[in-house]
Image (cartoon, rainbow, N blue to C red):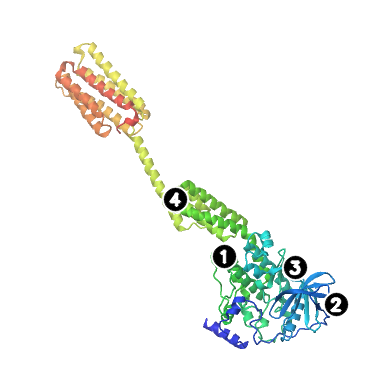
Amino acid sequence: MDDEAARFATVWSTLGLSRLGSEPALMATLTAASQAAVGASRCSSVEVPPLPALSLGAADAADETGGEYARVSTLGEGGMGVVYLARQRSLRRDVAVKMLRDPSAPGDAEDLLREALITGGLEHPNIVPVHALGRDAAGHPMLVMKRIEGAPWRALLSDPQHPGWEPLLAAHGEPLLANLEVLSRVAEAAQYAHRRGVVHRDIKPDNVMIGRFGEVYLVDWGVALRLDAVRPDEAAAAIRGTPAYMAPEMVEGDPRRVDPRTDVYLLGATLHELLTGRPRHDQPGLHATLFAAYLSKPAAYGDDVAAELAALCNDATAADPAQRPQSALAFRRRLTLHLQHRASLTLTEAAQGRARALAALRSAAEIDDLALRAVATEARFGYAQALVIWPDNAAAAEGLEAVRALLVAHELSRENLDAARSLAAEMSNPGPALSAALDALSERLTLRKRNADLALTEAREGDLSVAAAPRARLMLAMLAVTTAAHLALALRGPAAVTLRRMTAQHGLALVLALTVIFVWRRALVVNRVTRQFMGVLASMLVLTFVHRLFVLASAVATPVSSVVLSDLMIAAGVTVMGAFSVRRWFAVMTAACLVGAALVLVDPARATRWFTLAVNAMLLVGVGFSLRPASRDEG
């Protein structure tokens, strides 16, 4: 900053300017295109062809002796001239006549002639046509131009209710769009002038006129520079232009450094004022204003300014001309692109509103899932449509990415893995954190499913209702066999009831039962609890059979009642184990065995009867508990 200040001080001294300090009047009005030219020399003289004599007569249009032009009123005054509304008698039309305000002021006549010659050579719809150039009766230059029925752009910017807004708003809908379209027309006029070798050097809202029907004119070419008139050896002589808008090269006062990119800077400075309401170099005094122009540091714009326009402003007003858009046409193209992108930006703004509502719903204590998804759909649709119109809309792309990320987080919180993965796949850069969250949820769900599957398998393994019907049929068949065996012995009389015959019958029943279990194993032994159940039944058959074989083999005379009693106690022991390992209701079978054993003790003569009844009771208990509803299973 110190080096820049030193260089600026050198420029300030070279131009013969003293440090003037604060000048509120200058900064308040922002007029005087040549206020900074204090003590500076004029550019080289202008070669003007012989001019015809023109006259501006009295205001009475009926006075035919007053000459071709009759003055009606004063339209305005500038630094060197005054503009009158006049009536051209021959064509019966109103025109604007510009004359010197002070003919004695040195150089003003030359400036007016230069403006006339430059403007007259620029025939463009956005540049005021020149009708004639001549000299008045006193020999002073007199410029006749088209009369513009309208108002300066500055007047419209200062008054939102100005009637001049009506045609602009009718065509463009809103003030900003209208202003950007006006600036685009100004850039078009500047581009045309640049092709003709002319740089305006004072583009600003004050020098733009808006016609009654929305026409746009770039006016006041009094400080315009013909590039072919600049001598290679010409030194810095004067600062020309308006300090609040100036480019750095204008502050140096060297016309050799001025080129079309200087006007590009002025277009950018005007755009800055349209966006912020303040001049580009808004400082409290002339020295500070020129120093700000000399530095031309990038401006910081708020969120209310479109990023495209903010970038264009800073690019166009770069201190280094090489960093600016290289022509007014390039500036205008970027402005036009923004206007084309406005629909996309409007959709983006609407989508951003829905995205904010989405974030509020997501952060609520109780999330309304349906409302959240509806708002998310609206936000995603808005951003997507904005990108269809303008694929390079960075704000829409970022917004869409943020909405997707929020939705992914929502789906993750609800453990909707497929939906979260689908949304993440739409994101351009999900990031490692999101990928880790998806992987963690996948692992958690996989583990949960594995546990659920294990629980389901465990439940099925412990479900005694599985294969209940075939198991009941087996037990009923065993009941029938036991009863038939007992009846077969009983009908033959008490002498027929021997341990050997009972063991043989028991062995036959065991073989039949084991054969049936083996043949029907896929129907009977289908899970753990059925295997345990069938194991209890098989254990009772096998143990009691082994017990009888052991008694037979011992060669000790043992009463049938004692063997039957032991069989019932063995069965009781097995069912007790069943009560612990299979189902508690096996204890009912134990009770049946113990009741049968008690009856054997009380009535040993009928031991086989009590044994048969006890066994049948156990089998009926098994049938009953097997066929009862699964919901009542004690499992």
Q: Amino acid at mark 4?
A: Leu
Res 138 → quadrant: bottom right
Q: Is 197 left or right of 485, judged from the image as shown?
A: right
Numbered marks: total: 4
Q: Which residue in the structure is indicated by mark 1?
A: 305
Circles 4 and 3: CB atoms closer than 8 Å: no
265 displayed left or right of 481: right
The kind of secondary structure element at disc 3 is loop
Q: CA distance from mark 4 to mark 3?
A: 61 Å
Q: Depth-wise, is mark 3 or mark 2 nearer the camera? A: 2
Which residue in the structure is indicated by mark 2? 65
Label at residue 125: 3
Q: What is the C-alpha distance between the residues marked 3 and 1?
A: 30 Å
CA distance for labels 4 and 1: 36 Å
Of the residues under marks 4 and 3, which one precedes in the sequence?
3
Nearer to us in this view, 439 or 308: 308
Tell which circle, 4 or 2, labels the residue nearer the N-terminal end. 2
How packed mark 3 is, by other alpha carbons closer than 10 Å (few <14, some 14-19, many 20 or more), is some
Q: Pointers 4 and 2 in contact (CB under 8 A)?
A: no
Q: Earlier in the sequence, mark 3 or mark 1?
A: 3
Which numbered disc flags the more N-terminal residue, 3 or 2? Answer: 2
Q: Quadrant of residue 462?
A: top left
